[in-house]
Amino acid sequence: MSGISPIGFGMTVLYGSMMGQNTSASAVSASEGKAIVNPGESVEKRPGMRSSPAECETCKNRKYQDGSNEMVSFKSAQHIAPEEAASRVRGHEQEHVSNAYKKAAEGNGKVLQASVKLTTAVCPECGRTYVSGGLTSTKIMYKNEDNPYQKNKKGADASVLVGANFDAGV
């Protein structure tokens, strides 16, 4: 397995530059004269924060990128709106789970465990809580019938299980 963490596959947030920003078509906040870069968001500035969610450049420029070596979405950095981040990241992590099941089926294996963990963070500029990434952990067991230890284990298990389901009522 690979990715952001040594225990699974993951996706993380990148912060890009503000190149290509177009403020000519955006509205202007009446409170401070700043451009509204996230339409539909609150223009109220929380105490201790530099801007409101509607004026937050950090949220506007936040990008997500996959760090694994699998062929999945988000291999190149892409912007996701904060309100869409949870479902998009969850869908991306589900791709890793699907790949684990495919890999197990191809190699005569069995998926023992697959879990997805979404992480959250708080924007330092506006104070909005957002999904900052995800991590998929999988455990796959592969059967190795040629291994002599596996053959001995099967023989030992068979000797214990013989007669275990004996029905004396018949």
Image (cartoon, helix red, strand yellow):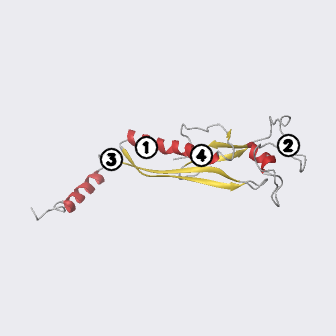
Residue sitting at 28 percent across and 51 percent down?
148
Q: Is residue 152 left or right of residue 139?
A: left
Q: CA distance from mark 3 to mark 1?
A: 18 Å
Residue beneath disc 2 = 35
- Distance (Cα) linking label 2 and label 1: 47 Å
User: Marks 4 and 1: which is nearer the front?
Assistant: 4
Please identify the residue farthest to the left as the structure is shown: 170
What is the CA distance from the residue labelled 3 to the residue labelled 4? 38 Å
Q: Secondary structure at mark 1?
A: helix
Residue 105 position, x and y percent, is: 38, 41
Residue under pointer 4: 87
Give yes or no for contact between labels 3 and 4 (Cβ–Cβ under 8 Å): no
Any mark on residue 101, and which?
A: 1
Q: Quadrant of residue 119?
A: bottom right
Q: Position of residue 133 (x, y in %)?
A: 63, 49
Crowd class of label 1 (few under 14; some 14 to 19; many from 20; radius 10 Å): some
Residue 110 is situated, as x and y percent measured from the top left of the image, at: 38, 47
Badge 4: residue crowd in 10 Å (few <14, some 14–19, many ≥20) = few
Q: Are marks 2 and 1 in contact (CB under 8 Å)?
A: no
Earlier-in-chain disc, 4 versus 1:
4
Q: Secondary structure at mark 3?
A: loop
Alpha carbon distance from label 4 to label 1: 21 Å
Q: Amino acid at mark 4?
A: Ser
Q: Earlier in the sequence, mark 2 or mark 4?
A: 2
User: Residue at label 3?
Assistant: 144
